[in-house]
Amino acid sequence: MDMHELTRELKVPSDSKIVLLVADGLGDLPLEPGGKTPLETAATPNLDELAVRGILGGSIPVKPGITPGSGPGHLGLFGYDPLTYRIGRGALEATGIGFHLTDRDVAVRGNFCTLDAAGKISDRRAGRIATEKSAPLAERLREVKIPGIEVFVEPVKEHRFVAVFRGDGLGGHVEDTDPQATGVPPLKPKAANAESQRTAEVAADFVSQACKLLADEKQANGLTLRGFARKPDLPSYEEVYGLKAAAIAVYPMYKGLARLVGMDIVGQAQTLGEQIDVLQQEWNNFDFFFIHFKYTDSTGEDGNFDSKVKRIEELDAVIPRVTGLDPTVLIVTGDHSTPALLKSHSWHPVPMVLVSKVCRTDRCTSFGENEAIAGGLGQFEAKYLMPLALANAGRLTKFGA
């Protein structure tokens, strides 16, 4: 019996409310041995107060030593084993912008790039071209015609777009064409298995035609394709937890993840303050709220320790607005660690605090990595967070006689 079978069996109705506030890439490292992390450096009186009232621990996104992408990191927090449910980036991007994938679709994330006269990449993101300039280019790519295949192209943001190929016999396992380097040409689409050979051929045809359509552009005259993926099949929050769930996110990828597990995407917030406004407006309409805060991750990837500190303080400042709604369970954590020292995602456990009226509090008095190591939750795989949330919310009955 897996965890979802168990929660299906034990779930009970309740009017309790659960809030999961995810600060992307929250976990970190000190810049030097014995120093403090950004979370420990930041002034966080409100998060520290949650630490006193709640119970701390360290979340392991996938398995010890495994560095997750944002997709697996969030799936674990949502209670879906990331090793069982593997979702490609293309499906996340497509779903995140509201594109409804079918069983005949393969979605892929596209990046506009800049090619030099020799066809080599000089800028992998086309100078992070502004969305108002890139969107018409994405729409221009709708002119691509491939026999037997429907081609859909949708703008996303800045240099990113989504392409969806619809047809028969398309597998979802094609290698990325982004070489992750400049001074070299984009890679050719290469099938990872026999079932995806047709998809690789379609992608190569798409790239060839697209580059001709972009040839006269100075900034975005090329493209790379990443994260080929078919539509995943995931049970919904309603099915496995009995929860009517809402997602309050800014970036399309996280909306896509939430939509794939059956959450409703609510609001059009662009700032953290606006996200909390949406939370307040929707409070009576849902049982579970997922709130995503991106900028603790992006500052970590930039290697900007001080900016990450400021973003954590920004997060701390809205905590009273959340607690003012009196959620039955409030959880604050991250989907993975993004140490500024490494400028990348990492495998380190992520600090977590869970607050409810029935949690068994520990001796922790502040919210940070070192305190979390000593917290009462210990270190556990993220996929077990949802059963803990349900239990603290009074939504699970007894197992067995």
Image (cartoon, grey):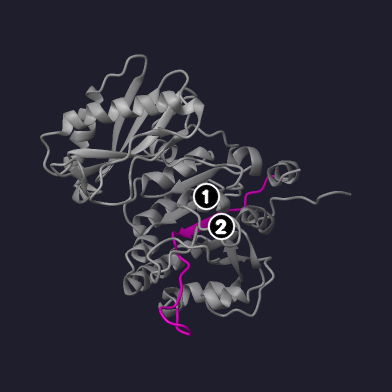
Q: Residue furthest top?
A: 148
Q: Residue furthest bottom?
A: 34
Which of 193/81 is in front? Answer: 193
Q: Earlier in the sequence, mark 1 or mark 2?
A: 2
Q: Which residue is mark 1?
A: 72
The image shows residue 50, relative to residue 232, as above or below, that is below
Q: Position of residue 181 (x, y in %)?
A: 29, 52
Query: Quick one: label 1, few (<14), some, or many (20+) residues within 10 Å?
Result: many
Q: Main secondary structure of the magenta part?
A: loop
In this rendering, the count of numbered labels is 2
The image shows residue 100, relative to residue 149, as above or below, that is below
Q: Amino acid at mark 2?
A: Pro
Q: Position of residue 151 (x, y in %)?
A: 33, 23
Measured Cα–Cα span from mark 1 to mark 2: 7 Å
Residue 27 colored in magenta in the image: yes
Q: Which residue is mark 2?
A: 61
